[in-house]
Image (spheres, rainbow, N blue to C red):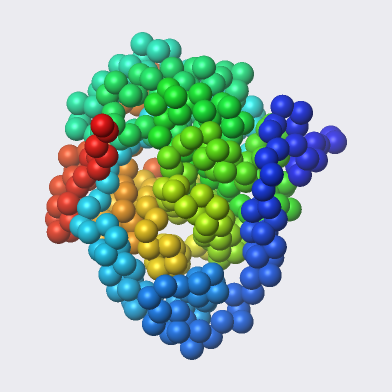
Amino acid sequence: MERTNHMEYMEEMEVIPSMIMEQVISGMNLYDYEKYSAEDVKRALAKDIRSLEDFAALLSPAAEAFLEDMAMKAKEERMNHFGSSVYMFTPIYISNYCDNYCIYCGFNCHNIIRRVKLDEAAIEKEMKAIAKTGLEEILILTGESKKMSDVAYIGRACEIASKYFKMVGLEVYPMNVDEYKHLHACGADYITVFQETYNSDKYEKLHLEGHKRIFPYRMNAQERALMGGMRGVAFAALLGLDDFRKDAFAAGMHAYLIQKKYPYAEISFSCPRLRPIINNDKINPKDVHEAQLMQIMCALRLFMPYAGMTISTRERAEFRDNVIGIAATKISAGVSTGIGGHTEKQEEQGDNQFEIADTRNVDEVFAAIKEQGLQPVMNDYVYI
């Protein structure tokens, strides 16, 4: 089967004047993490402000021996910029229809699962139930099907969310600037886009059909969102799809260059690892162990100390509780990656995108944050 060129935009995709993608890919390709020594790591740790080169050293194998030192420094930076606050939120999946064929994702269009799209009444019911837990921030997610979850549908979900929550995030398919403007007008504050892997050759092998196959359109999504008025943008690579050090370096460089170009933008990171999916529990990442995940998170905290950072329910509860006091600033709670998971029984939901490891509810996560000597925060924005 002849496939679409993954580097060529489709007709309806907006092209913006930006060289950030080219800079990131060039930097990633030149990144040789084996060249860094213990002395390079020590120099990076000794600095108050760290360069991209320092970040590269902190991600290298040489830095593994300094993980405790990195964690101590990261904890200092986290305290300096965020204090003891840990922000809480939950995701809500409103549709799992998807037009993409991504071989690692449970929602992919060739996977035989129960597909569901919540109507406005069901969305409001879900959001009411979530709001009763005390949460004031929500992240709206859909499968990547513009046909089944068009911009108007997502916009209406944002409007409903704005009735119950002070912060509304989106993790949906990439859009054009005018579409992001519409969603911002409907109440969306920020967007999250996982680039999955920054290796365009590997990306092409993993994304076989659909709009997501187009690598540059996805990579420029955060910039289009900021041009559309979004206050914040989040970056992530799905660790384990390819060389995790290079992907982590590229994600950090991507965020760094966006911050330089848009200094007002609120920047944040997610650091998800690959998880088993429905109908395929044999999907396993290239070895990305918890110590290496901690190294990545500490390196990001030391490089961009003012950036937010989310720790996913893909990780064990014990790891999440540990990392919120060191590098992460945000934690999800009461999570379901199925459709209708906050009010309906499991057998009545659409199927899950992936398996989670931390199933604790909001009260349990709230208590765990307090046990760490930290302060759970539901919202830190005051709207005038």
Residue under the image location 26 percent in, 32 percent down: 384
Asked if residue 94 shows in the view, the reply is no
Quadrant hosting residue 102? top right
Residue under the image location 72 percent in, 46 percent down: 204
Extreme bottom residue here? Answer: 39
Instruction: Decide which of 10, 272 is in the foreground and name it.
Output: 10
Q: Is residue 47 left or right of residue 180?
A: left
Q: Position of residue 270 (x, y in %)?
A: 44, 51
Q: Position of residue 330 (x, y in %)?
A: 32, 49
Residue under the image location 62 percent in, 46 percent down: 219
Quadrant hosting residue 338? top left
Q: Position of residue 144 (x, y in %)?
A: 57, 29
Does 99 appear above or below 90?
above
Instruction: Decide which of 381, 200 is in the foreground and name it.
Output: 381
Q: Is residue 225 left or right of residue 93?
A: right
Total labels: the figure holds: 0
Residue under the image location 24 percent in, 27 percent down: 131
Q: Is residue 72 left or right of residue 174?
A: left
Which quarter of the image is occupied by the N terminus?
top right
